[in-house]
Image (cartoon, rainbow, N blue to C red):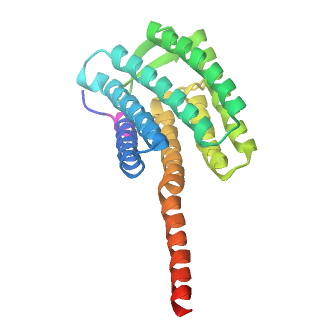
Amino acid sequence: MSLGTLSLVNIVADVVLLLSALALAVIMAWQNPRRHGRAFAVCMLTFGLYALSDLLWKLARPLGYAPHLPFKAAMVFYEISILLLTLLAFAYGQLPVRSRRLLAAFSLPVGAVFLGVVMSGALYRDFRPLSGGIYGYSLTGTGLLGALTAMAYLGVVSVLLWRHNSLRSRALALPLALLALGLALHAAAIPLHVYALNVLAVTTAIILIGRTLIRYEVFKPLADLNAELIVKNTELLEASRL
């Protein structure tokens, strides 16, 4: 089967997400091999696996293989990626330790339950071919509840980061709000999920978060070091003059 326009758009969206995630993982692992850099690189690798699985799901109909396995893999990697990203945001956004512990205590067990539900295949039903060379599906009642829970979770995390009122936390609030928006469009009553809007939201969010981490973990330390060197050089010149 030839690729339709819609299928091509979805494939391009997944490829852009895959390349963006891998590029950010390499940059942070190379430029900042400390704890936050390594954690972000691992998170980006899981987003890359999500993009790759989603790409295989989008290619299922054109290439003529069953879509269920890559679709389920995409959902698993998406959930793991979101969980890792929010845990990273808790720490990097410098939220109070008590808030971080409470959020982690909620996130980990709920994430484990949700992962089990994803693996059971209870979130989606009615896989059917659509025009444009792709498959469509419907959310079950459990899937709708899971999507609403994930949207509420991302929304709460975004609000907490914004209200913390630090430069780092506020820089992370918008990307997480974009993830909630992408999930909302994915779960909308009209079949917006076939247009890869969630993939585009994820791509935008990780690029924004990557820019924030590169700014504070790579460029800011270099700027601080340069400023310190300028001060030291000025002191040496003054001592030499005296």
> At 46% from the left edge and 6% from the top edge, which residue is drawn?
120
Q: Residue furthest bottom?
A: 241
Nearer to me, 88 or 56: 88
> At 35% from the left edge and 42% from the top edge, which residue is drawn?
22
| Residue 68 versus residue 242 in the image, above or below | above
Q: Is residue 203 visible?
A: no
In the displayed structure, does residue 163 sit left or right of residue 232? right
Q: Residue furthest front?
A: 242
Was residue 54 drawn as part of the magenta stretch in this picture? Answer: no
State whether the magenta stretch is mostly helix, strand or loop: helix
Percent position (x, y) of residue 130?
A: 40, 23
Q: Quadrant of the C terminus?
A: bottom right
How many numbered tags mark residues here? 0
Q: Is residue 37 visible?
A: yes
| Residue 208 versus residue 107 in the image, above or below | below
Nearer to me, 215 or 181: 215
Was residue 7 drawn as part of the magenta stretch in this picture? Answer: yes
Percent position (x, y) of residue 96?
A: 71, 37
> At 27% from the left edge and 26% from the top edge, which residue is drawn?
62
Percent position (x, y) of residue 49?
A: 36, 30
Q: Quadrant of the N terminus?
A: top left
Percent position (x, y) of residue 214?
A: 48, 53
Part of the protein shown in magenta: 4-9
